[in-house]
Image (tube, coloured by chain):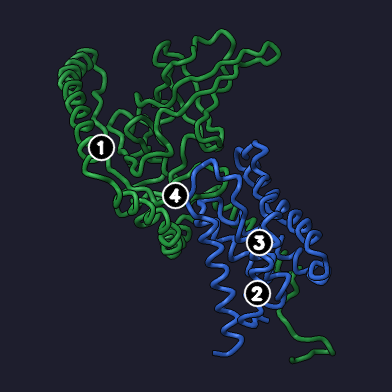
């Protein structure tokens, strides 16, 4: 070993390294939190580390393969019949929808209001990995090459799932509405009451704070997106109110709700590009 | 293969396995019972070979986790470099401790790791408020003796030093 003045020559001491790397971490966090400068670097790292995620997904893929292997003809036939029935029902509803939509357009034209353009949707497959413990995020196999953008709304067959928060070339991270950092403006479908739904970190619980004791809200009410924030298009189901507690010592009601979307079941979600009405409100094209 | 290169390969392999185990998908109810394998592996190697695995390794692992987790870049990097530093500083004592006492020290280290993460998450938004947030550290303490034995055998088998 090379020695200098009797001391072995090494790199900087652990303390020096800790201080330097600590400062670097702090700088990274600040830039990552405040701006978009680091998005490129993060996107690059996400692509580099994608193989790790593929490897982590192997056990689940094997499990699904095994399940498929043991699916019998009878199961498939049953499933087919069920889907057929469901399809007929949906087609019937769709017939009415066409007429309603035409009527709605006519009425809007009479009022002189901007007509709502239909939202465009793209299916995205989930990458089966877990993300940060006690946060609610998912990873989907769609990215910048599919024109996915940060803040893009994500839905499933039952309601709003969340919004895109990070985008790489063929991967993106979606923050779910149940994440503790997520909030979404809603409308009570029955009373028209406006509120904001916050994630709790718990997979089937949402909080609706800041509602006074006289607010017109009941258990079982459907909350739909109001489109107020400009991120989510209006009218998609968000949650169903499950519990209302009125503690006289608190100034607000304690309202809990259950997400309408099936956040931990499906293998697919839909990325949507909101129609005209929502994008003009945001003042920014996707 | 030189012993140096072989050692590096073993270290890389053990960290890669730990990272994959950290992001292994599972049902939501199991979340509180999954320990931070990367932190445990990092603590072991910082204790066993502090001249090779130290603050820099911890930081790199943290950045990798931040990218995979989708969390704020630097959040886990800071937490992991702090626990690497403490472990390297205390490695002579930690090596001498009886196994249970070592496990308790690991609990403290894992808790510091989680505490830093929850502070940062609290500073930028809403931190998880449940008590279940802390269970991974306790599970980590419980599995530590096994991690220790497995990694020690790996170290002896391939003579990582």
Residue A120: assigned label = 1
Q: Is residue B76 left or right of residue A239?
A: right
Density class for disc 1 (Cα within 10 Å; few <14, some 14-19, many ≥20) is: few
- Examine the rendering and report whether any part of residue A107 can be seen: yes
SS category of the residue bearing label 3: helix
The colour one sees for chain B in the rendered image is blue
Whether callout 3 and callout 1 share a subunit is answered no
Q: Residue at x 15, y 18 (%)?
A: A99
Residue picked out by circle 4: A166
Density class for disc 3 (Cα within 10 Å; few <14, some 14-19, many ≥20) is: many
**Badge 1: chain ID:** A
Quarter of the image containing the N terminus of chain B? Answer: bottom right
Pointers 2 and 1 in contact (C-beta within 8 Å):
no
SS category of the residue bearing label 2: helix
Q: How far apart are labels 2 and 3 at the CA level?
A: 16 Å
Query: Is B2 rendered above or below residue B149?
Result: below
Foreground disc of the pair 3, 1: 3
SS category of the residue bearing label 4: strand
Residue extending furthest toward the top: A214
Pointers 2 and 3 in contact (C-beta within 8 Å):
no
Front residue of B24 and A187: B24
């Amino acid at each position: 070993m090379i020695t200098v003045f009797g001391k072995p020559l090494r790199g900087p001491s652990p303390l020096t390294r800790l201080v330097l790397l600590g400062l670097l971490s702090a700088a990274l966090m600040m830039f990552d939190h405040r701006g978009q400068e680091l998005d490129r670097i993060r996107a690059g790292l996400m692509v580099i580390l994608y193989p790790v995620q593929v490897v982590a997904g192997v056990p689940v893929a094997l499990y699904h393969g095994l399940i498929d292997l043991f699916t019998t003809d009878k199961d498939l036939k049953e499933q087919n019949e069920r889907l057929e029935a469901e399809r007929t029902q949906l087609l019937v509803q769709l017939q009415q929808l066409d007429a309603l939509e035409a009527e709605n357009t006519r009425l809007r034209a009479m009022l002189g209001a901007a007509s709502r353009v239909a939202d465009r949707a793209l299916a995205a497959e989930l990458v089966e990995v877990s993300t940060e413990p006690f946060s609610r995020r998912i990873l989907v196999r769609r990215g910048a090459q599919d024109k996915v953008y940060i803040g893009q709304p994500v839905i499933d067959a039952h309601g709003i799932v969340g919004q895109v928060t990070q985008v790489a070339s063929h991967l993106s991270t979606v923050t779910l509405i149940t994440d503790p950092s997520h909030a979404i403006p809603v409308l009570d479908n029955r009373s028209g009451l406006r509120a904001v739904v916050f994630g709790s970190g718990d997979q089937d619980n949402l909080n609706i704070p800041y509602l006074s004791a006289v607010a017109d809200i009941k258990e079982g009410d459907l909350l739909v997106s109001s489109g107020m924030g400009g991120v989510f298009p209006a009218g998609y189901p968000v949650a169903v109110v499950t519990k209302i507690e009125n503690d006289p010592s608190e100034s607000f009601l304690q309202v809990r709700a259950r997400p309408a979307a099936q956040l931990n079941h499906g293998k697919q979600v839909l990325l949507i590009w909101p129609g005209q009405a929502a994008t003009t409100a945001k003042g920014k094209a996707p | 293969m030189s012993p140096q290169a072989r050692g590096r390969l073993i270290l890389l392999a053990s960290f890669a396995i730990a990272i994959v185990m950290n992001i292994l998908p599972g049902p939501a109810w199991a979340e509180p019972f999954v320990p931070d394998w990367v932190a445990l592996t990092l603590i072991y190697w910082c204790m066993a070979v502090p001249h090779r695995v130290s603050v820099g390794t911890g930081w790199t692992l943290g950045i990798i986790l931040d990218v995979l987790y989708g969390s704020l870049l630097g959040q886990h990097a800071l937490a992991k470099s702090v626990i690497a530093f403490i472990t390297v500083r205390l490695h002579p004592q930690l090596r001498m401790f009886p196994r249970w006492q070592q496990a308790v020290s690991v609990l403290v280290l894992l808790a510091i790791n989680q505490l830093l993460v929850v502070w940062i998450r609290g500073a930028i938004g809403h931190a998880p408020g449940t008590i279940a947030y802390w269970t991974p550290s306790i599970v980590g303490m419980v599995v530590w003796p096994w991690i220790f034995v497995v990694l020690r055998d790996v170290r002896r088998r391939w003579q990582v030093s």
